[in-house]
Amino acid sequence: MDHVNGYAYGYWPIVIGSALVMTFLVLVAFKPKTRVDWKNMGALSAFFVALFTEMYGFPLTVYLLSLWLGKKYPAADPFSHSNGHLLKVFLGNSPVISFIIHPGTDILLLIALITIYAGWKKIHKARGKMVTDGIYRYVRHPQYAGFMLIIVSFLIQWRSSPILCVKSPW
């Protein structure tokens, strides 16, 4: 299949396989026992299905916006990976955009992971006492801040509906 010019989605075996593998790994690692554990496992499994459907099956954003994108940007083929990143489509499909987006979001992701690690390290060393130094001098909940940075990084890097609100032409 020609990924540059052709339809680059619809890899349903990869969607199913990836969701099953991830669900299995979490199941083996956490071994749910209670009813609440199994409910959480179901929610996490649903997240994996949605994630891999978005990545390899058919992006919801492309589905919802294909009619509008086809009329507004007739030169952009929303069904190809080369035009799959909506920020590139909206900002003129410049290779500079990819050069900025991917390393920028990777750096943001690294900052998020360091923030989470620094917070966990301080809490672990405190042994139940209140922590007010280190990263906690600047952020009260570095783990939450780190997770939010991860989410923002993924929203920018992956084509998804919420990012349209940030760079919307309306």
Image (cartoon, helix red, strand yellow):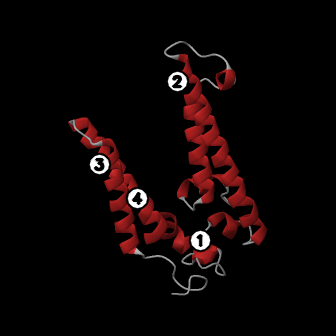
**Percent coordinates x, y for residue 43 in the rendering:** 33, 47
Residue drawn at 22 percent across, 35 percent down:
34
What whole-number distance in Å separates the C-alpha atoms at marks 1 and 4? 17 Å
Tell which tag, 1 or 3, sits nearer the viewer: 3
| Mark 3 residue type | Gly
Q: Which residue bears the numbered disc 3?
A: 42
Say what secondary structure mark 2 lies in.
Answer: helix
Residue 58 showing in the rendered view: no
Mark 4 to mark 3 CA distance (whole Å): 12 Å
* Residue density around tag 2, few if under 14, some if 14–19, many if 20 or more, within 10 Å: few
SS at mark 3 in the image: helix
Mark linked to residue 50: 4
Residue 54 is situated, as x and y percent measured from the top left of the image, at 46, 64
Q: In the image shown, does 162 or 94 lie closer to the viewer? A: 94
Compared across the picture, whether 95 is left or right of 8 comes to: right
User: If you read the primary sequence from the N terminus, does the residue marked by circle 1 or circle 2 appear first?
Assistant: 1
Mark sitting earlier along the chain (2/4): 4
Residue 87 position in % (x across, y down): 67, 63
The residue at 36%/74% (across/down) is 13
Q: Are marks 2 and 4 in contact (CB under 8 Å)?
A: no
Residue indicated by mark 1: 84
Q: Earlier in the sequence, mark 1 or mark 3?
A: 3
Relative side of 122 to 55, left or right: right
Which tag, 3 or 2, sits closer to the chain's start? 3
Q: Determine whether 97 is above or below 125 in the image.
A: below
Quarter of the image for the C terminus: give it.
bottom right
**Residue 128: horizontal and vertical position, in percent?**
49, 15
Q: Earlier in the sequence, mark 1 or mark 4?
A: 4
Q: How far apart are the two marked residues, 1 and 3, measured between alpha carbons?
A: 29 Å
The residue labelled by disc 2 is 124
Mark nearest the camera among 1 and 2 is 2
